[in-house]
Amino acid sequence: MCAQPGRAFLNTPGRRLRRNARYRASFQVLVTLLAAGRYQTLEAHCKDVSKAGLGLMIAAEIASGEVVSLNFTLPGLSEPWEVRGVLRHRRGYHYGFEFLSLCPDRNTILKQFIQGLERADFDQESAVPGTAERRPHGR
């Protein structure tokens, strides 16, 4: 299914509408934070990306509101990024970081990167009417 930036998804019971669409991604991220008076670097895996931040899997405990440094290279690009982020959400080992600031050039690159990615913030069956892939029963 092609990504459809700018198209809202239906709000199903128990789901909140998001300000920014999330897209599936898979790349390594180094998360650096100040813990107990010293810098600690954690290995993380990006599961989703939006124009506002990253969803990461991290096998560690990080406090909500923690400001970190996110170091990564977007797939297909060669330039490494170092971006400041703040932890806004956590569910288990899935952490949601919001970018604190991106320069206009990085915003443009990020928008181009996510343009071809699959949406991650809704299920296929609850997608915008007429866009969900229908599968025969039993498959």
Image: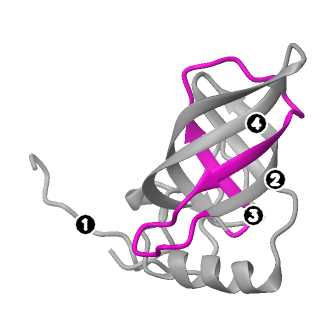
* Residue carrying label 2: 84
Residue 92's tag is: none
Query: Marks 2 and 1: in contact by CB < 8 Å?
Result: no
Mark-to-mark CA distance, 1 and 2: 41 Å
Of mark 4 and mark 3, the one earlier in the sequence is 3
For badge 3, the amino acid type reads Ala
Measuring from the top left, give residue 15's x and y in whole percent. Answer: 66, 46
Query: Marks 2 and 3: in contact by CB < 8 Å?
Result: no
Of mark 4 and mark 1, the one earlier in the sequence is 4
* Residue carrying label 1: 134
Circle 1 or circle 2, nearest the eye: 2
The furthest residue to the left = 138
Question: Magenta stretch?
Answer: 51-80
- The foreground one among 30 and 49 is 30
Q: Is disc 3 surrounded by few (<14), some (14 to 19) or many (20+) residues within 10 Å?
A: some
- The foreground one among 46 and 18 is 46
Residue 61 location, quadrant: top right
Q: Is disc 4 surrounded by few (<14), some (14 to 19) or many (20+) residues within 10 Å?
A: some
Q: Is disc 2 surrounded by few (<14), some (14 to 19) or many (20+) residues within 10 Å?
A: some
The furthest residue to the top = 36
Tell me which residue sits at (64%, 73%) in the image. Answer: 8
Measuring from the top left, give residue 35's x and y in whole percent. Answer: 83, 20
Of mark 3 and mark 1, the one earlier in the sequence is 3
For badge 1, the amino acid type reads Arg
Residue 52's tag is: 3
Picture quarter with the N terminus = bottom left
Tell me which residue sits at (65%, 57%) in the image. Answer: 11
Q: Which SS type dominates the magenta stretch?
A: loop
